[in-house]
Amino acid sequence: ARMRFLPSLLMLSSLLQKVEMSDARAIVRDASADSLVFVDELCKGTEAKAGACIAAATLERLASHNGCLGLFATHLHDILELPIERSALELMRMETEPGDGEGGKWRRRATWKIGHGVCTESLAFQVAEKYGIPDEIVQRAYALSLGLEQANARSTEVEAAKINGAAGGQEEVVEPSEEEEQEEVLSFDRGVQVLAGLASEALGEDAEAIRLQRGAHPPPSAIGYSCVYVYRLSDDTYYVGETDNIAQRFSAHQSTRKSGLTDFAFVKLPKGGKSVGRLVETQAIRRMAGMGFDLISEADGMHSNFGVR
């Protein structure tokens, strides 16, 4: 009975993809600057990487060519790594907050609010638990996800090491002396130096830190690339983050931090994509926290990816 049912499932999947592609073709053909377009999970029924590329190309066309206003929702996170035109895009995410109970970071709940940034995780474990998947399966799934996250982190570190090797071998990391740390610990310049140094190590080449004054705009050459940034607030607290839309992120931080942003600098990562960006972000947070910087983003150094600030 199962073998007889399988062809029906395959036919249904093929039919759904056909309908989806027909709808996408019609939207791309007919949408204009006066259109309001909603696209939900385009290419969800096909292979993930190819689907991400088709979805990304469609999104790029709608934003840059058709010029329409709309909402494009997706779980195809590879889109974030693709070099598409992003000047007309604004990245948003559904926000979450810690939930009740014990058992791991996945016990979170939706706030039903949309915020700036991206989120590469979902509430899949909560949904599975809520709708009756046995607890031992949910816990096992969560353990597997942690193992996968650690494997990806190791892979990123290996890739960064390969890049360093291709650039001429490992470089010796010179740690500042205790006297230097005490003298520079509260210096924004020192934080920028740490960030640029770690980015240079990951890229295997010199990475330039670019400073932005209030009201300024990042150079066009930074658009579409993963960037790691650091800023200081008027109360001498610091924040380190990663983004693939530095213009939007700089604007958001200027307008939302009540205590006042006083200094801001970022480093563009022209190779390695978001994975290297997150690696540098985590390393910078840990290094600066260890030096004594008062970081409001210190928790992000624990690889919690429920939305990138």
Image: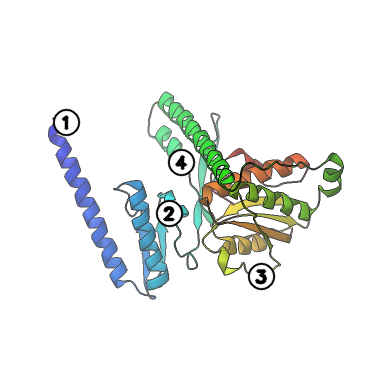
Say which label, 1 or 4, has the lower sequence index. 1
- The secondary element bearing badge 2 is classed as helix
Q: Between 9 and 82, which is closer to the camera in this rendering?
A: 82
Amino acid type at mark 2: Ile
How packed mark 4 is, by other alpha carbons closer than 10 Å (few <14, some 14-19, many 20 or more), is some
- Which of discs 1 and 2 lies nearer the camera? The answer is 2
Judge depth for marks 4 and 3 and give the one in front. 3
Q: What residue is drawn where x is 42% and y is 70%?
A: 64
The disc labelled 3 sits on which kind of residue? Ala
Where residue 216 is drawn, which disc sits there? 3
Q: Distance between the residues labelled 3 and 1?
A: 62 Å
Give coordinates of residue 203: x percent, y percent.
Answer: 59, 50
Image depth: mark 3 or mark 1 in front: 3
Residue at 40% over, 64% down: 60
The label number, if any, that marks residue 171 in the structure image? none
Say if residue 11 shows up in the picture. yes
Residue 106 can be seen in this image: no
* Residue named by callout 2: 79
Label whose residue precedes the other's in the sequence (4 or 3): 4
Q: Which of marks 1 and 4 is in front?
A: 1
The residues tagged by marks 1 and 4 sit, at their Cα atoms, a distance apart of: 31 Å
Mark 4, residue position = 123
**Element on which disc 3 rests:** loop
Q: How far apart are marks 2 and 4 (CA)?
A: 20 Å
Can you say whether 266 is above or below 283 in the image?
below
**Gap between marks 4 and 3 measured at Cα:** 37 Å
Tell me which amino acid carries mark 1: Arg
The one of 96 and 193 positioned closer to us in this rendering: 193
Question: Does 64 sit left or right of 156 as displayed?
Answer: left
